[in-house]
Image: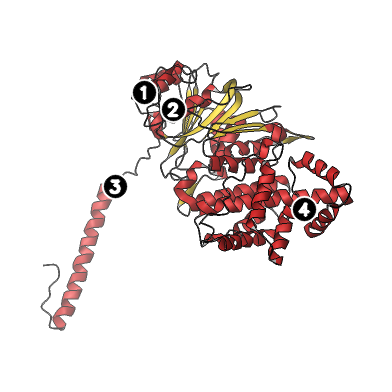
Amino acid sequence: MATSIELGNALWAAADVMRQKMSADAYKDYLLGLTFYKSLSDKYLIKVADLLENNTNMSLEDAQKLYESSKDTDDYEDLCEELKNDFGCIITPDHTFTAFYNQINSGTFLLENLSQAFRDIEQSQDAHYEGLFDDFDIASKDLGKNPMECNNMISSVIKALENINFSEYEDDALGDAYEYLIGKFASESGKKAGEFYTPQAVSKLIAKIVTSGREKKQGFSIYDPCCGSGSLLLQVRNCMYKQGNEDYSRHVHYFGQEINNQTFNLARMNMMLHRVPASYQHLNNGDTLATDWPVDEPTNFDACTMNPPYSLRWDALSSLITDTRFSRYERLAPKSAADYAFLLHGFYHLKTDGVMGIVLPHGVLFRGAAEGTIRQHLIEDGSIYAVIGLPANLFFNTSIPTCVIILKKDNPTRDILFIDASKDFVKEKARNYLPDEAIEKILKTYNDRQDVEKYAHLASFDEIKENDFNLNIPRYVDTFEEEEPIDLDATFKELSDLSKEEAELNATLNSYFKELGLNINLGE
């Protein structure tokens, strides 16, 4: 069986037909949408073969013929009911991905039929699929200047994907390949990618921290108020390991909110391709700061992860000071930078014994005014547990260095661990990358919670108070390296020797010039 990396490369190759005509930010919606539909359709056809012939090794083409022939039988309605129970939707025989591929080859394929297939899924009784393909615009000028060009473009992508049988891959392999695609799109999209993707290494670091020591907890719940494509949420799956016959990753409840509808749909597809059961995924399309969510039970979570847009302007309405998310902290985050508004929102929804990890720019560690007041309240409450400085240029949407702030509600000592991991990176083309050994070094230091020379320092509350509640990492972790002392006597001797050598060379050259009849005298 091929690996998720091989599958990812095959999927990325399918983008070649669009890459020359449109930007990654435009064609990602089409490739990801068709990849999702192909996966759903392939698994659907193999289920048909299983139900009708008890054969899960049947080829997609044979399963397609079997499905088509069943349409005129008395068992067809019962078959559809069984399929709907399994998949939450119906894909008719003439709307499977394989059927569309055959229609392309026979010259009968119409884009409107693909759109109808999408609508049928979205309008199924399971509201889980509602609006899932909103961003798949078959009439977009990005696809072509006229309907025929649009039809040809989508047909080319369908043909490129048809050779991949998604039913042959494990759910995790397919989900990982999809995540790989999202990362590739983020890399090509550059700054635009910041809204939907957190680099996997950073996601892995935060997920490992917030689940540390709680990997076997039943009913574990995690919340991301700025979930993007869901990459941070889904990293938790890799931290919840199998124990005997019990797979703890299957018992994670995922809660996420995303303001961008396009990205919200991407997160839903990502969850589905990772085979997160519908009852365990709770995603919402909305504005986290303007409208608190969730407000129904449960509202507090075992972990909170977040990579919000940095220093975003927001409507810091004076009425929000009475909002229970912010009222304890005396001031609202300034209109010019919503960083602390996001932090306080997530922290509000954390359980008493929960752990939160949020990525923010370094400015939140030392800026004054309202942010200084909020930061002081958090420190006095013992809410900030650790501050981890990351290398610069890790993210697609900014080259600035960032930090991960870890928060807890049960830190009575009020001490804070500072880790400076800013130098632990590997350069990868135009960006930096956090390697596994750097992640493990951070995790060990975080768990040991002890000083490490030129890398980490556990600061007491009194020490932080003496620094006027300024959390700038260099105040606590001294990474200064002294230069080697200079031997002045040896240096002057070396200069003297060089001067003598220069004089000898000049004398030799002057003799040559004189022989040549040139009036040149070096060294004068």
As measured in the structure, the alpha-carbon distance from the residue carrying label 1 to the one carrying label 3 is: 51 Å
Q: Earlier in the sequence, mark 2 or mark 3?
A: 2
Q: Is residue 224 visible?
A: yes
As measured in the structure, the alpha-carbon distance from the residue carrying label 1 to the one carrying label 2 is: 10 Å
Q: Amino acid at mark 2?
A: Tyr
Q: Quadrant of the N terminus?
A: bottom right
Residue on which the image places disc 1: 370
Q: Nearer the viewer, residue 274 or 358?
A: 274
- Give the label, 2 or 3, closer to the camera: 2
Q: Nearer the viewer, residue 59 or 180?
A: 59
Residue on which the image places disc 2: 340
Left or right? Give the position of 163 relative to 258. Answer: right
As measured in the structure, the alpha-carbon distance from the residue carrying label 4 to the one carrying label 1 is: 61 Å
Residue on which the image places disc 4: 93
Disc 4 and disc 1 in contact, CB within 8 angstroms: no
Q: Earlier in the sequence, mark 2 or mark 4?
A: 4
Q: Amino acid at mark 1?
A: Ala
- Give the label, 2 or 4, closer to the camera: 4
Q: Amino acid at mark 3?
A: Asp
Residue on which the image places disc 3: 487
Q: Earlier in the sequence, mark 1 or mark 2?
A: 2
> Is the residue marked by circle 4 packed among few (<14), some (14-19), or many (20+) residues within 10 Å?
some
Q: Earlier in the sequence, mark 4 or mark 3?
A: 4
As measured in the structure, the alpha-carbon distance from the residue carrying label 2 to the one carrying label 3 is: 51 Å
List the single residue furthest toward the bottom. Answer: 516
Q: Position of residue 447 (x, y in %)?
A: 57, 29
Q: Position of residue 154 (x, y in %)?
A: 61, 59
Q: Secondary structure at mark 4?
A: helix
Q: Going 35% across and 28% down the picture, which residue do you hit? A: 367
